[in-house]
Image: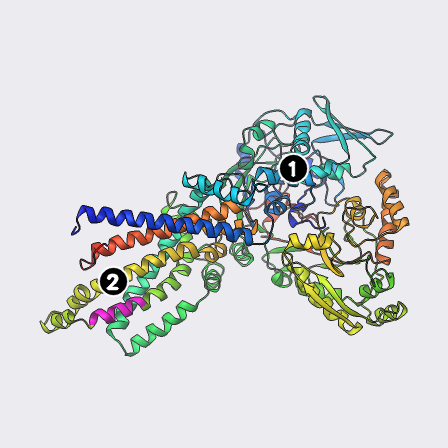
Amino acid sequence: MTKVPKSAVASLALLSLAACSTGESVDLDGSADEVDSAVLRAAIGGEPDQLDPHRTSAYFSFQVLENIFDTLVEPDENLEMQPALAESWELSDDQLTWTFHLRDDVSFHDGSDFMSDDVVYSYERIINEELANAWRFDAVESVEALDDYTVEITVSAPTPNLLSNLGGFKGMAIVSEENVESGDISSNPVGTGPFLLSSYTSGDQIALEANPDHWSGSPELAGVEFSFISEPSTAMAALTSGEVDWTDNIPPQQVEDLVDSDSLEVEVIPSNDYWYLAMNINEEPWDDARVRQAIAYAVDREAIIQAVSYGTAQENQLAVPEESIWYTEYDQYANDPDEAERLLDEAGFSGGSIEFLATNEYPETVTAAQIIADNLEPLGFDVSISQPDFSTWLDEQNSGNFDMLMMGWLGNIDPDDFYYAQHHSDGGSNAQGYVNDDVDALLEAGRTETDESNRADLYSEAAQIIADEASYVYLYNPAVIQGWVPEVGAYQVRSDAAIRFRDTTLEE
Amino acid sequence: MRMSPRAVTRFLGMRLIHSAVVLFGVMVVTFALIQLVPGDPVRLALGTRYTQESYDALMAASGLDRPMGEQFFAYIGSAATGDLGVSFRSGQPVTVLLFERLPATLSLAGAGLLIGLLIAVPAGLWAALREGRLADGVVRITSQFGVSIPDFWMGMLLILVFSTGLGWLPSSGYIPISESPGGWLRQVTLPAITVGTVAGAILTRYVRAATLEVANMGYVRTAKSKGLAPSVVTLRHIARNALVPVLTVAGIQLATILSGVIVVEVVFAWPGLGRLVFDSVASRDYPMIQGAVLLIAVMFLLINFIVDVLYAVVDPRIRLA
């Protein structure tokens, strides 16, 4: 499957551990604490469908759950995995056995101790009940508790992205068996995270209060109230009139003005999601790399970005943005219609009518398709755009019933996740039909290379071949846009769009 | 009461049968329409990448793997006993979710209708009594504007002026009336004005028309010619009789508001039925959509029934038949 709704993305990470442990300004009797800590009011764009982290796939759920649950490891601001519930781990020489050493001072919000059985229970629940994230355990053969605070995971083949699978987002949270068995987890979840749920008013808001015993130290805030405001203009009005302190539901057309405003802090950073164009390599003329490259030169990314995001997205000719540790600099394809024409002449192709597969479920695909159609017209292409619902879109894609399509790939942390499936000749999402033995070899090597810098080189090389041959024509990284009142401090916008309030402060 | 107990029983019996038929129709149509809407709830619920096994497991858990006919009769059967199923999205019983949201919508609709009537009754009477004069023209033109105002635009305008601009009233949120009547009032004012403006504009036109009709009746001329004070004629003879048809329209307006506050609830982040329907449609939560439509249909029928009964009580010329 090719696309991942926004939902999938929610991971979070925590500032570095070092930063967390400085947050221990809590006094032990707790009374003085109430005087200087405040409740942060956050407006999010919709209501969580449910609060069971293993069953929901909604981004709105993960915005809240990020603050209630923990994972074994978690991504820092560069999306590198850092210790969380596991304080350290080792990998066997054959790369098939991972041993995790858990913190021994963690308890769930109901007071019960967190131990290795909880990890085994949580993972087996996802695997055995075939929950949405079961695919993340594809390589996992067993999960065992060696003792109260040691968990051993064996895999069938070297899996360098195991950590990002286990900790990339709170869909892999460690849950409490009692909470699950009682059925309470969907509305009253019990986690180990920095905040615990104190009340939930259907349709209106969820209130969290600080967990003073969190392993990273007590949060600075006394609590967080999430209210659900789906209309961006209303959320913006609530922020400007001081009814809320923080929101991520900001109308993109207002961003330019807001960034310069003194009364609000608004930050825009590129996310790790990307949107791309792909052509059906199994069909003529797209089997000729020169024709695909011509399209890459003809597409006006700047115009697309203006149209789909009011200029907030960031142009990119490869998958992930500069902020990522997997970033590779690449700018082969300036918008150059003459070069496009030259390549088409060289390939002996003079245009024709083509079918652009967009979908109304992701309106950006329709908007961009219109611009691309306009870009290609001078080259002799007559583009007709179809926009079926997403189920039909997937069927059409998988049966190769398209000339050209646009889609997004979201929640990208580990390059194996976003290169192998799409560009390896055996990849499960390689609907465009790209085959290159060198790329296959590089992507296979990347799966087993455990030295991080060697691994980065492998993927960098593969990515450049992929873009040179235009297996995908990468377009842009959409923005994460969040805003808050100046009284909010120590909050960091993250490229995985996870919302982490555990170190955040609020002046009254 | 001017009716025999037998007539009342027969009336109620007929209405009950009639309502059951309508509700059955609503269920059939809703069930069929939902199936026609593109989008697979299981695929939407799984969201990201998933395995075929995950897909099959969720299909089976939500009963969507069973034949369509079986699904329909299972739904009708359990609905008849008051069990509307379990929401795909939240895993909670649909009836619980509906009744959690109902008070917010009822209180908004009630407040909206009240504002509508506060506008419509004086404006309509005033315009009718000055038929053809400037006041009448002003009311008629203003109400035409009122009918055409989009809820969304009106809501945003009120937020801009009274929340961001003047800072008098909150732009969003909800406090139950049972928790704090004052807090509820602050929260409900802007959404209720939004709802009430359109309802008020529609009702104004009915009040005006009904008043004109009554004002030309023989008994009004008689009352006037007897030398009764104009205020007595207006209140006792005209207004009281003119308001009978207005009652019907107001009832229908209330039902319309209840089923049509989706936009207003979305704009003001009001946690009512409308937003529940909105969210449920987005995720193709079939049981939730069916349950919400059924509840709205029941309320519609109930309000119509109450209006019919009140009608007979208010106007002795009307017989229940």
How far, Cα to Cα, is label 1 from label 2? 59 Å
- Above or below residue A391? Residue A254 is below
**A269 magenta-colored:** no
Residue at disc 2, secondary structure = helix
- Above or below residue B171? Residue B96 is above
Q: Position of residue B83 (x, y in %)?
A: 44, 39
Residue A166 in the figure: left or right of residue A186: right
Which residue reaches farthest top? A147
| Residue A74 location, quadrant | top right
| Residue B119 location, quadrant | bottom left
* Residue in the image at 28% along x and 79% along y: B133
Residue at disc 1, secondary structure = loop
**B210 magenta-colored:** yes
Q: Position of residue A110 (x, y in %)?
A: 56, 28
Q: Position of residue A209 (x, y in %)?
A: 55, 37
What is the three-letter code of the residue carrying label 1? Leu
Neighbor class of circle 1 (other Cα within 10 Å; few <14, some 14-19, many 20+) is many
The residue that disc 1 covers is A131
Residue A115 in the figure: left or right of residue B209: right
Is there a contact, CB below 8 Å, between mark 1 and mark 2?
Answer: no
Q: Position of residue A340 (x, y in %)?
A: 84, 69
Which of the chains bears the disc numbered 2? B
What is the three-letter code of the residue carrying label 2? Leu
The residue that disc 2 covers is B243
- Above or below residue A34? Residue B167 is below
Which quadrant does the C terminus of chain B fall into? Answer: bottom left
Of the pair A392 and A423, the residue shown nearer to us: A392
Which range is magenta? B206-215
Which of the chains bears the disc numbered 1? A
Residue A5 in the figure: left or right of residue A446: left
Residue B186 in the figure: left or right of residue A295: left
Of the pair A87 and B41, the residue shown nearer to us: B41
